[in-house]
Amino acid sequence: MLNDFMIRAAVAGSGVALAAGGLGVFVVWRRMAYFGDATAHAAILGVALALGLALPVTGGVLAVAIAAALLVHLLAGRQASGDTVLGVVAHGALAIGLVAMALVPGGRRDLESYLFGDVLTVGAGDVALIWAGALAILVVLVWPWARLLTATVSPELAHASGIDPAREGLVLVLLVAALVALAIKVTGALLVTALLVVPAAAARPLARSPEGMAVRAALAGVLSVGFGLALAWVLDVPAGPAVVAVAAGLFVLLRLGAAVLRR
Amino acid sequence: MSLISVEQADLRRGRVRVLHDITLAVEPGEIITIVGPNGSGKSSLLRMMTGELRPLRGRVRRAPGLRIGYVPQKLHVDPTLPLSVRRFLDLPHRVDDAAARDALGEAGAGGVAGRQMADLSGGQMQRVLLARAVLGRPDLLLLDEPVQGLDQPGAAAFYRRIDAFRRRSGAAVVMVSHDLHVVMSASDRVICLNGHICCEGAPEHVAAAPEWRALFGTGTGGALALYRHAHDHGDHPDHAHPAG
């Protein structure tokens, strides 16, 4: 049962889940879920550009995701209607990406694998790239952890302590864009945000500290990858959605458990 | 040298001019109270001093290495963030347990170290914010209506703690307050703000100024007299101060 491609999928998925757990807690605390969607949807446009220009897909996705993330960060930060801006960018980018995919050669054929992921086809090179990227994300996250956390708790207090919360916010925005580029093969553009938000939300009832929540979110993500891949194998369903479905099930179980224990 | 000096500063938020022609300097060890009606730019002035808001014109100069302890009007911690009071005190720099315990105790929040920030009441939050501000051993405490949500005995105790900290540390204090009793008793200098500095000076001087009367009415005189009475005869059995 344990084929090479299943092992590669599990290793690749775990790498993404670890980074997504650490980053996802900030996405939850700062209510950046919609921002994550906007960035991830723009990734489809990146795929189309990369295919059209015959460039590496990960590079195309990374470039467009960073551009979209910066654009949304600037636009949404400037006005109160940030939610609306996010809505326009999230859906606009997805629509433009879908149009572009239909125009590039081979785009229609591959579209589904970029929307929903195709983790069972990752090669050894993909696995190495994913782990290198995931570790880089974790290092950039852990290094300024106290500053990021202070800026998240209160931008005002951060300023008074000599921390620039806008810069810390920018770090997180760029890390989300990087994660989108890493995760597109694993979960696809439509479910990247799920990997950020769902394990972190599932970890909340088990955590008493910010660091504890991040570690538990990473573990919940890795567990979801393991069980999700098994589910995909047994039922012969797409792996990305199976992983997210398991994470959502974990979330429901833990919330119910916490509610029962609180009585 | 001044801890902070604001020179000819104008501040806009969007198209609205919030502050204009603000010039003031905070000297080591002094207590300045900023008073003014709602929307007069008091909080914005404090946030300009921390560096959060940048003046459109003019400048804000902070002494090199200045440590600011800031107590915002309120702090909302998202319930999705598990953060104990003790851990909050470690942001952004870790403090040792004994110092944290002392600071919480002095701020009147001795029992809450293990509580989650999202579960604190308004009054507990204010005390925890003060404890955190003091832990950074600030040269300057900036307090934005710090007793909002405290009852009068609580507010009186809060001001006593701030005063005790100032005496011990020699830190300067700049606070926004609505409480005219406190303004009159504890401040070295009062700044009356309404978009610009309408008047400033020693409390007695400011209370006599026509700009002050225009903003706060003549009722202030009565409150002042009442306070003076309570202050001079703190233990007097028939004094009228409700906090007594």
Image: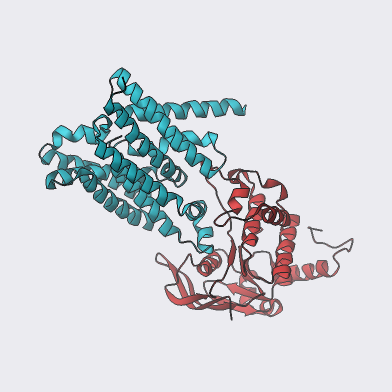
Chain colours: A cyan, B red
- Left or right placement of residue A194 versus residue B236 in this view: left
Count of all numbered marks drawn on residues in the image? 0
Question: Does residue A222 appear anywhere in the picture?
Answer: yes
> Would you place residue B208 above or below residue B35 in this image?
below
Q: Give whichever of A231, A197 is nearer the camera.
A: A231
> Would you place residue A89 above or below residue A108 in this image?
below
* Identity of the residue drawn at 25% across and 32% down: A118
Question: Does residue A87 appear anywhere in the picture?
Answer: no
Q: Give whichever of A180, B2 is nearer the camera.
A: A180
- Quarter holding residue A120: top left
- Left or right placement of residue A177 versus residue B12 in this view: left
Residue A130's spot in the image, x, y percent?
A: 31, 41
* Identity of the residue drawn at 42% across and 40% down: A21
> Would you place residue A98 above or below residue B101 in this image?
above
Residue B45's spot in the image, x, y percent?
A: 53, 69
Residue A146's spot in the image, x, y percent?
A: 51, 53
Residue that extends furthest to the right in the rendered view of this protein:
B237
Residue A60's spot in the image, x, y percent?
A: 21, 47
- Left or right placement of residue B226 versus residue A189 in this view: right
- Quarter holding residue A41: top left
* Identity of the residue drawn at 58% across and 62% down: B70
Q: From the image, which quarter does the C terminus of chain A lie in?
A: top right
Residue that extends furthest to the left in the rendered view of this protein:
A105
Q: From the image, which quarter does the N terminus of chain A lie in?
A: top left
